[in-house]
Image: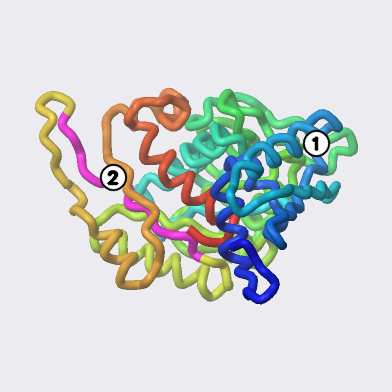
Amino acid sequence: MNNPANTPRQPEAEEALIRAALTPEINHRLRSARIVSRRAVIVAEAGDLSDLGRADLEAAITAALKPLPEVDEVRIALTGERRRRRLIAVGSGKGGVGKSTLTTNLAVALAKMGRKVGVIDGDIYGPSQPKLLRTEGIKPAATPDGAQLVAIDSPYGVKVLSMGHIVAPGKALAWRGPMTGKALSQLVDADWGETDLLLVDLPPGTGDVQLSMLSAHKPDGAVLVSTPQDLALIDAARAGQLFEQGEVPIIGLVENMAGYACPHCGEVSDPFGQGGVEKFAAALEIPFLGRVPLTLATRLAGDKGEPPAAGDDETAEPFRVIAEQLARWLDTGKL
């Protein structure tokens, strides 16, 4: 790693060493990182920072890297280029597997890590994000020219837009396929401010919304959600095939409702089976991101618009673990 003249450089190892020394917030800004002749050369994006913020970023990078035994000097170049907003689809082949709850809590966990996150409620016919992010009854404003909706700020540092914010509560939508595609585009193309990551809470299956997204707003990656039961796994495989056909990388699989602890006696049961998603992921050589248990506390929190990930108790932990892996993939393309 000292890079003497007669030793080939190892760019991946150099970058891994540097990233390990930096915080997730700084890693999110890195464009390149290498060590040449014991000199760390860093390029980071700072287009959204003030002069003071840029100075603080440089100081933080230098302070983190100077103690490394492989580094004698740190050189930093800050670019003014703004990051492209990234889309991550959260999907499942089947309804009722907790996909919306996972999307909400991943977004909140990522926001707690310093990410600028938004949630698009792509379930046009059955929107649930207004309740989950406690934004029911709020109507989105429009930009001054009327061309875009303006994303709504939730109480948890996550912006959100949903058809549930636009259509009257309880009103059924009887729209054909092309209309759902236009609705999704309206949400994606909204004014999201400084948000640079959007999680798209997709409806179940492989229908019009998914096809419209793949053609007009291709995601950077997809997270698949399933319960451990065989029927849900079969449908998750179909959803995965759709993303693969659209050349969207599958970041990994999440096992939801993985065991239920009785609130009275503490005994754990597995109404949907146990470990099925992890075995399924291994068989398909897809990363397994983790499991989220079925708890009464999580269900009650969702109904009240209080995402467990916003807290610091044991119900937040599974979401934090999965969010950290997603953040790592966003920063490095690997888990």
Q: Position of residue 130 (x, y in %)?
A: 54, 32
- Quick one: which residue is furthest to the right in this view? 145
Q: Could you tell me if residue 292 is visible in this image?
A: yes
Q: Position of residue 236 (x, y in %)?
A: 38, 63
Left or right: 38 as drawn, with respect to 300: right
Q: Position of residue 158 (x, y in %)?
A: 60, 33
Display colour scheme:
rainbow
The amino acid at mark 2 is: Met
- Kindly report the distance in space between the C-alpha atoms of the residues bearing marks 1 and 2: 43 Å
The residue sitting at 63% across, 67% down in the picture is 11
- From the image, tell me which residue sits under label 1: 54
Say if the magenta span includes residue 85: no
The amino acid at mark 1 is: Arg
The residue sitting at 50% across, 70% down in the picture is 242
Left or right: 89 as drawn, with respect to 290: right
Mark 1 or 2: the one toward you: 1
In the rendered image, the quadrant that contains the N terminus is bottom right
Mark 1 neighbour density, 10 Å: few (under 14) some (14–19) many (20 or more)? some
Q: Earlier in the sequence, mark 1 or mark 2?
A: 1
Mark 2 neighbour density, 10 Å: few (under 14) some (14–19) many (20 or more)? many
Left or right: 44 as drawn, with respect to 24: right
The residue sitting at 58% across, 49% down in the picture is 69
Depth check, front residue: 53 or 290 = 53
Q: Could you tell me if residue 167 is visible in this image?
A: no
Residue 71: assigned label: none
| Residue 153 sits above or below residue 180 on the image | above
| Residue numbers of the magenta segment | 250-262
Q: Are marks 1 and 2 in contact (CB under 8 Å)?
A: no
- From the image, tell me which residue sits under label 2: 257
The residue sitting at 76% across, 40% down in the picture is 191
